[in-house]
Image (cartoon, rainbow, N blue to C red):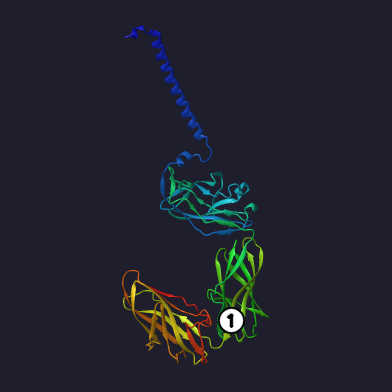
Amino acid sequence: MFEHLVPSYHLELDQKRSSKRWRFYFVSFLLASLSLVFALSWSKGPASKAEVLSPKTNQLKVAIVDQNTTEVLPQAINNVLFSFVLQTEQNTSLHSLAISAPEIIKQDIFKDQVRLYEGQTQIGSWEWTEDDKMLFKLDNYSLSPGTHDFQLRADNLHDSLVGQTLTFGFQQAQDIVTSDGHSFYFAKGEFPLFKASVKVLEHSQILAYNNLSKTKFLAPLNINTLVADFALSSQGESFAIRRIDFLASKIDSADTFYLASHGQMLAKAEVQQDHLFFNLSDLVLKNDQDLNLQLWANLNSGDNYEFTLANLSAKGFLSGEEVDNQVDLVLSSVEPRIDVLQVKTDFQQSLLTDDWDSVFKINLQANHSEEAALYKLNFQVTDFGLNILDWDLWVNGQAYAVKPDWQGQLLTFDFGENGALIKQGLEIELLVKVKILGEQARLQLTLLGDETTDSANFLWSSSKEKYNAYLLPDFPVTPVILEQ
């Protein structure tokens, strides 16, 4: 009711202020927008960074090739630090990779030595660093449908890395960016994805291990027999093995020795007093892989032998260094005898049926004793999901009149005071009759040996003297497993 008392110039002033305020807000917004566009266009990193961050994925899959810890040498060329596979179902282009490597990001001197390869082709180098990641801009490197193997390699690692453990991998899908020419895509899969580790060694080395679980055993005279089985393993690089030396006590002049691998003879020993020397030319010990070797002998003396891996001579493929390793690994203690019982298992069946099944086959040979005999067999029995109804034993293709004694998990066959004569050989087959009660039925049998001289799981005789399996080289025997 008092509107008419308000001066007109006040109304005009308010209208002018509102108009100026609106123009001010508009101009401010416009300037802010232009500043943002200008800043994005001049930001560091890939020119297409804003596009790369679009939340798209494609069918590109990534996998780490080796999850085991590996060792590298700082002075070596082409150290493989990280191996991975990219798999695509369509033609695409690899735009960029960001590989996490937190332990080496601070090593600026290391940067120029790092390269990215597909196969033997270098496709990129470490261009810049961001968030503990090595970034590789790959200029839309073409990927055809299929699997592509990549490796991150480096030469002459900096000495400050010696003794350190390095890790490499991909933190997220955005670390692997592809392009179809119009849009950018991320890899598909579960992240993060890391390999185990890479250890930087000061020097490469060769290690040796004994493969035999039983190191004291009998060996037949005048027959080629295995007297030692061992493995070599390298750390840091591959080696050319030049010579292997053994110490062997009480060598007879008529004894002969051979070194073999995978059933192939590598060399015959040169014997000098109590040493065996094997000179080798083409034996390669690959990095991070075991090389299994066997020492065979034809022994003519009844004296006990002890075999020790004494020394290795080799040359490193990467470093070029000559290595002369003193090993001193005791391999075996062997007692040669003319009447050693040979025990061989020959069994292929693994299917368990609801009736009679052949579950174990043993072949016994005593080549130098007409009076050798078998007195006792013990089996350990483990079963699941079935009822065992009966056992039967066949010898040389015929049912044998011996009664099984089955108590708990122990199954015993006693061949009496006279035993079963071995003569030209015994082929023993064990059969079982079962009733399967349900799915996943399982039966496991182990022919038991003897861990001491007083044990009596396996008894045999030669020249009317009884022995157990304590010193027989063919024990322990691998268990047999049958499943439904």
Query: Badge 1: how crowded within 10 Å, few (<14), some, or many (20+)?
Result: many
Up the image or down, 99 lies above or below 309; here it is above
At mark 1, the secondary structure is: strand
On the image, the x and y values in percent for residue 192 come to: 47, 50
Residue under the point 33% across and 8% down: 2
Quadrant of image for the C terminus: bottom left
In the foreground, 282 or 219: 219
Residue under the point 48% across and 32% down: 37
Up the image or down, 35 lies above or below 320; here it is above
Pointer 1 residue: 334
Quarter-wise, where is residue 77 in the image? bottom right
On the image, the x and y values in percent for residue 435 come to: 31, 76
In the foreground, 260 or 107: 107
Q: Can see residue 224?
A: no
On the image, the x and y values in percent for residue 410 come to: 42, 79
Q: Can see residue 47?
A: yes
Answer with left or right where residue 74 lies relative to residue 214: right
On the image, the x and y values in percent for residue 330 come to: 61, 74
Residue under the point 35% across and 69% down: 440
Up the image or down, 17 lies above or below 248; here it is above
Amino acid type, callout 1: Val
Quarter-wise, where is residue 182 in the image? top left
In the foreground, 450 or 40: 450
